[in-house]
């Protein structure tokens, strides 16, 4: 994939601004129209399959710059998998999914409808990755303290929201972002059906040039990506992607986080390949995980 026309995002950590989209070959996120799969009993990925996937991911990442991690929950089978997630990652614009969840829960708790103005903020924050809109909603939910309270109540234990204007510096493990996606999409979760549909509609219709990432695993995708040349890493790129996928009869929640890529294009390639490997393993694709290229 060639990624062109990227604007610097180092200021995301310091101050808000409209996030410029990446360009290249888009993979449009397709609006999901099916009912959610029945909730399965949660389980770990079978040991032999986990070892095979571990080996495939390790083999691939040995040849890649920086570091990366992935977590997946297959809602159809109940299988969970996580790889190399001990040390948290900066979320960049993936934090906007956390902000959206907290905002919708706040409106529910207050018994208030989302106003037309707030709809515009949420739409632009998710569909266009607008940083100004994210900042305004972050302040609406109480900033760092407000988002932390919501996440802890939801059992999202390891996410650390950024202070002040620095919501993009929120740090998290992939499995905690999978939990955020669970709370956002689960019919038995905290969000009303109307708010779940709204959130998924936004994530299913991001700007085409921003629809890369976990969508590379094919199927129907509702996603949000984050990308940033991080000052804390000397300008090396943080590139992340999270979302819900429907692939080969499976409904999966997936988070792929990476950092220290030399450029955005390299980070996108890493994230997309990890998503393909993990999804193919959990959906038992005809191609084995070792054979995916």
Image (cartoon, rainbow, N blue to C red):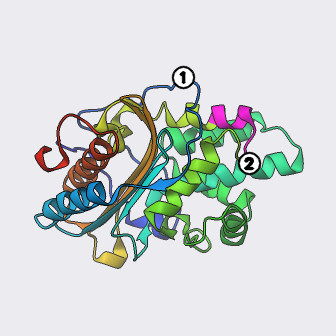
186 horizontally vs 87: left or right = right
Q: Residue furthest right?
A: 111
Spatial CA distance of label 1 from label 2 is 20 Å
- Callout 1: helix, strand or loop? loop
Secondary structure of the residue carrying numbered label 2: loop
Q: Nearer the viewer, residue 219 or 2?
A: 219
Residue under numbered circle 1: 34
Quadrant of the image containing the C terminus: top left
Question: Is residue 227 a member of the stretch shown in magenta?
Answer: no
> In the rendering, at what x and y percent does residue 282 appear?
34, 45
Would you say 35 lies left or right of 281 here?
A: right
Considering the whole magenta stretch, tell me its main secondary structure.
Answer: helix
Return the x and y of residue 60 as percentages of the image width and height. 15, 59
- Name the spot of residue 117 as percent of width and height, x first: 73, 38
Residue 9 appears in the figure: yes
The N terminus - image quarter: top left
In this view, 131 is above or below 160 = above
Q: Where is residue 36, by image quadrant?
A: top right
Which disc number belongs to residue 7?
none
Q: State whether residue 224 appears in this view.
A: no
Magenta residues span 191-198
The earlier-in-sequence mark between 1 and 2 is: 1
Image vertical order of residue 270 relative to residue 153, above or below:
above
User: Looking at the image, which residue is at 83% across and 38% down?
Assistant: 113
Which percent across, then down, holds residue 267?
24, 57
Q: Residue at x 33, y 70 (%)?
A: 84
Q: Is residue 175 left or right of residue 183?
A: left
Q: Report the front residue among 195 and 293.
A: 293
Q: Residue at x 68, y 66 (%)?
A: 143
Q: Which residue is mark 2?
A: 190
Asked if the residue under mark 2 is in contact with the one under mark 1, i.e. CB atoms within 8 Å, the reply is no
User: Is 275 above or below relative to 58?
Assistant: above
């Amino acid at each position: 994939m060639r990624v062109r026309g990227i604007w610097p995002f180092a200021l995301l950590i310091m101050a808000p601004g409209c996030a410029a989209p990446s360009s290249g070959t888009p993979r449009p996120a397709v609006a999901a129209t099916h009912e959610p799969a029945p909730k399965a009993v949660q389980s770990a990925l079978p040991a032999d399959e986990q070892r095979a996937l571990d080996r495939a991911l390790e083999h691939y990442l040995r040849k890649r710059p920086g570091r990366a991690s992935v977590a997946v929950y297959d809602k159809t089978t109940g299988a969970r998998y996580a790889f190399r997630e001990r040390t948290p990652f900066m979320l960049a614009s993936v934090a906007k999914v956390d902000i959206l969840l907290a905002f919708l829960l706040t409106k529910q708790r207050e018994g208030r409808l989302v106003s037309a103005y707030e709809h515009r903020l949420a739409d632009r924050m998710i569909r266009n990755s607008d940083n100004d809109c994210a900042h305004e909603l972050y302040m609406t939910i109480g900033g760092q303290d407000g988002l932390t309270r919501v996440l802890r109540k939801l059992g999202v234990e390891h996410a650390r929201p950024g202070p002040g204007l620095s919501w993009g510096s929120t740090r998290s493990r992939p499995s905690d972002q999978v939990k955020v996606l669970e709370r956002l999409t689960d019919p038995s979760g905290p969000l009303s059906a109307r708010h779940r549909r709204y959130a998924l509609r936004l994530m299913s219709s991001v700007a085409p040039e921003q629809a890369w990432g976990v969508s590379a695993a094919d199927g129907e995708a509702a996603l949000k990506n984050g990308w940033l040349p991080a000052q804390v890493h000397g300008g090396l790129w943080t590139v992340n992607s999270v979302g819900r996928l429907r692939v080969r009869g499976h409904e999966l929640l997936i988070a792929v986080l990476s950092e220290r890529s030399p450029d955005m294009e390299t980070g996108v390639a890493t994230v997309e390949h990890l998503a393909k490997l993990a999804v193919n393993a959990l959906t038992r694709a005809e191609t084995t995980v070792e054979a995916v290229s």
